[in-house]
Image (spheres, rainbow, N blue to C red):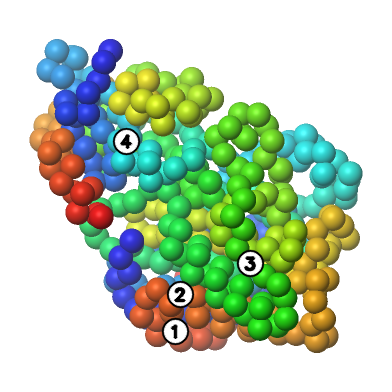
């Protein structure tokens, strides 16, 4: 799998989703390079369990950078079918490659039309550039 | 983060159990709304208690060499905070929390350093006026690498992160945060004296001549107002305990 940031859809809370049409309704989810940079130095992460059902916008995990705990929100609704559990013990991978090795979960979408509500790459880039 | 409203409520709470203290802070964070006030809470604990950082496990206490030398820590009640960082021994200290609602717009992840710095600088300046040689730490013992190598001390006051408040080699104020969609919770602990439960840590009164019975809760309340007031328009109203109880219903 090779995921490029330009291929992705984004939430305002900085999660990305990769859901190509040939993936059979399965979406891969992670957090953006901008979010990883904001988090700075990651020390802990909690990810969901396989089988967990999530609604779009629902918390699916938490990440602790030095002193601050931040939630991560699912961009789409569905059931978690795979988790990158090894990432929890190799958080440095997220700094190095948030879009490929840094994926967090795969979710079988229950409503793929939700993807249309997310930002494309250009819109997301514009949002974070306005953040200053 | 944009501040959505400039009014704030401050309560100097009574001493409560660890479970109750954490429940109240969690409740205040859950109830944060964009139009709502900033809630500042100054509080103490009804008995010596350990509060663990959100991801800490109590079994890590036994693996920490400094804590192993103080076996009485093992028998203390403990709770888990919603905020990050290391464990705090709540005994000879004053705790604060505040919840700031976030505005609608782009959400953020990670620490809000502006808030840390503002509060810690206000406390630093106050301690300097009391005659202490206080400064903000530039050191950091906590990182991805330190975690992998299992080198993070268990106790917050034995760790160093940028903006921690130190007097010489002694850390006297540490803070930690948690974000949600609705708001940001910041916890902090001002270490007043050495505790018999963990002797190696020294507090402000061990490091300077402070008058007996110094009103630390009131003093810290004023520093929090100063610190937050330096970065946002703050119109803070002191809340009576009975009104605070009403707020929690």
Chain letter of disc 4 in the image:
A
Q: Earlier in the sequence, mark 3 or mark 2?
A: 3
Q: Residue at x 82, y 49 (%)?
A: B73
Nearest-to-viewer mark from 3 and 4: 3
CA distance separating discs 4 and 2: 30 Å
Task: Determine crowd level at label 1: few under 14, some 14-19, many 20+ residues with C-alpha closer than 10 A.
Answer: some
In the rendering, at what x and y percent does residue A97 appear?
Answer: 36, 25
Is the residue marked by circle 4 packed among few (<14), some (14-19), or many (20+) residues within 10 Å? many
Q: Marks 3 and 1: same chain?
A: yes
In the picture provided, is B129 more to the left or to the right than A7?
Answer: right
| Residue wearing tag 3 | B135
The residue that mark 2 highlights is B228
Residue at (56%, 83%) from the top-left corner? Answer: B222
Q: From the viewer's perspective, is residue B146 above or below residue B193?
A: above
The residue labelled by disc 4 is A33
Q: Secondary structure at mark 3?
A: strand
Same subunit under labels 1 and 2?
yes
Choose mark 1 or mark 2, whichever is in front: 2
Image quadrant containing the C terminus of chain A: bottom left
């Amino acid at each position: 799998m090779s995921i490029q940031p330009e291929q992705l859809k984004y939430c305002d809370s900085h999660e990305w989703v990769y859901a190509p049409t040939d993936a059979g309704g399965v979406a891969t989810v992670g957090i953006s390079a901008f979010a990883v940079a904001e988090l700075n130095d990651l020390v802990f992460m909690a990810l969901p369990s396989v089988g967990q059902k999530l609604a779009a916008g629902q918390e699916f995990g938490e990440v602790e950078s030095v002193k601050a705990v931040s939630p991560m929100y699912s961009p789409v609704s569905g059931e978690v079918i795979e988790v990158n559990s090894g990432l929890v013990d190799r958080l440095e991978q997220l700094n190095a490659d948030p879009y490929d090795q840094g994926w967090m979960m795969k979710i079988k979408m229950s409503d793929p039309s939700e993807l249309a509500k997310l930002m494309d790459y250009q819109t997301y880039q514009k949002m974070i550039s306005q953040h200053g | 983060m944009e501040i959505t409203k400039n009014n704030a409520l401050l309560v100097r709470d009574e001493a409560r159990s660890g479970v109750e203290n954490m429940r109240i802070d969690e409740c205040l964070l859950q109830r944060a709304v964009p139009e709502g006030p900033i809630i500042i809470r100054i509080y103490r604990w009804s008995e010596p208690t350990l509060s663990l950082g959100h991801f800490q496990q109590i079994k890590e206490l036994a693996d920490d060499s400094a804590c192993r030398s103080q076996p009485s820590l093992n028998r203390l009640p403990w709770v888990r905070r919603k905020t990050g960082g290391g464990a705090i021994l709540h005994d000879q200290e004053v705790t604060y929390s505040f919840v700031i609602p976030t505005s609608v717009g782009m959400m953020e992840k990670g620490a809000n350093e502006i808030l840390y710095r503002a509060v810690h600088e206000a406390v630093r300046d106050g301690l300097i006026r009391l005659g202490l040689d206080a400064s903000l730490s530039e050191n950091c013992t906590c990182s991805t690498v330190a975690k992998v190598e299992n080198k993070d001390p268990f106790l917050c006051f034995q760790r160093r992160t940028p903006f921690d408040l130190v007097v010489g080699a002694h850390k006297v104020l540490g803070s930690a945060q948690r974000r949600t969609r609705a708001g940001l919770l910041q916890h902090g602990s001002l270490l007043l004296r050495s505790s018999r439960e963990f002797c190696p840590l020294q507090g402000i009164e061990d490091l300077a001549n402070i008058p007996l019975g110094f009103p630390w809760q009131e003093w810290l309340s004023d520093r929090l107002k100063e610190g937050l007031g330096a970065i946002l328009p703050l119109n803070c109203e002191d809340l009576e305990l009975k009104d605070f109880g009403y707020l929690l219903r």
